[in-house]
Image (cartoon, rainbow, N blue to C red):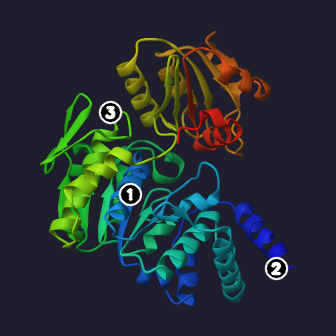
Amino acid sequence: MASRVKINNIKELEKRKNSTHPSLVNIRKILLLLKNPQKNLGITIGITGTNGKGSVAKTLSTILNDSNLKTGLYTSPHLYSINERISIGKKNISTKELNQILTEIFETEIKANIKLSFFELITVVAIIFLSKKKNIFNIFEVGLGGRFDATNVIDSEISIITNIGKDHKEYLGNTLLKIAKEKIGIIKKDSFFITGMKPYPLYRVKDYILKKTKKIYVFKKDFQIENNKEFYKYENLTFKPSLKGSHQIENMALVLKTCSIIKNNLGFDLKNQNIVDSLENVKWEGRFSILSSTPYKIVDVAHNYEAIKVLVQNVKKITSKKFIVILGMLNDKDPIKCINELLNIANKIILFKVNNQRTFIPEKIAKKINNKKVVLGKSEELGALIEKDKNILYCGSIYFIGDLLKKYKNLRSC
């Protein structure tokens, strides 16, 4: 009977949908009944942004754990299993612990007559789990936006916004300014605020930020990172990053500025050699993973226009050769605009459905683009395509890439 309850817990979690009208009301009510575990999270770091927030969160977590500063990490979405979203060091939450916490939350939902959304529910799981582990630091990656994101029930001592681009426009607004106003909602009173935001829209929201905190650090204005071919230099640190791509320059700068604050302002011992070793060994699968260069096999979870544009730039920097692009995207991510960008490096783009209700419909997209290079793919052809002795780029939704990596182990990079 007990094992059946566990299975039902996971199934119930997976059945939940995300809210189309985000609010913090329900999650706050549930957390109150659970005695506010979010107030027992040690030093917390909240990270949002259009792209790069997962890389920043993972790298920062790696550095802190490698420095013997026990650090919890909450990210989304996942590649293989939901357990990946909640971890301490290299260890994910166990299925047993996940189920136990879900039971506690479900019982609380019944008492409160509230049903949390999927993301609210898994966020509460993360808060309870990480609060019990007595970590020194806990890092929370925002799921969507910031102001009304479920993670915003946490009072972070450090807030990071990587960048602002036009994504999730149906929820956050259709201009950079509207999206920025949502994302700066994560900044807490007197917290340290670190960002890679461009001058616009930053200068338009700076007055609001200053009402929250004066401890503001802006990339390229207050701190820099140098890129000398294969090596990066930040202050007195020189390292060769394990995460590839020009977009990682900004991500690593945000990470290193955060490390400086943790060391100089919060008083924790972060040794330079530990930081360098972590930067050179951090693993974050599916982020411009070059699995082979003869021929090229590249895997990347670029899933919106901003990320696709950077991906195309990164590919051009390593080779002038054309690629077969294997692509699966969600319909709300401007797939036509993304495909037109990918045509700059592709001799063929093969479209596949994503195992998600928000998938684009390949037939409709191909018809709208009307380009002979853009063709429809069949799931039974994927195996042969992967074995093909050609330059191949696999990209798009993390759901699509996750399914590919699960099915074809020879695409695994680490």
Q: Residues within 10 Å of mark 3 (few under 14, many from 20)?
A: some
| Residue 366, position as x, y percentages in the image | 67, 20
What's under tag 2, amino acid-wise? Ala
Question: What SS does tag 1 mark?
Answer: helix
State the separation of the CA atoms marked 1 and 2: 35 Å
Residue 275 in the image, given as x and y percentages of width and height: 27, 54
Which one is in front in this view, the residue at disc 3 or the one at disc 1?
Answer: 1
Residue at (45, 49) in percent of width and height: 173
In the rendered structure, find residue 2 and report the number of the disc placed on it: 2
**Disc assigned to residue 62:** 1
Q: Left or right of 155: which side holds 406?
A: right
Q: Nearer the viewer, residue 396 or 97?
A: 97
**Residue type at the position of mark 1:** Thr
Q: Which residue is mark 3?
A: 246
Local SS, label 2 = helix
Q: Nearer the N terminus, badge 1 or badge 2?
A: 2
Measuring 68% from the left and 79% from the top, which residue is drawn there? 100
Mark 1 and mark 2 in contact? Answer it, CB < 8 Å: no
Q: Residue furthest right?
A: 1
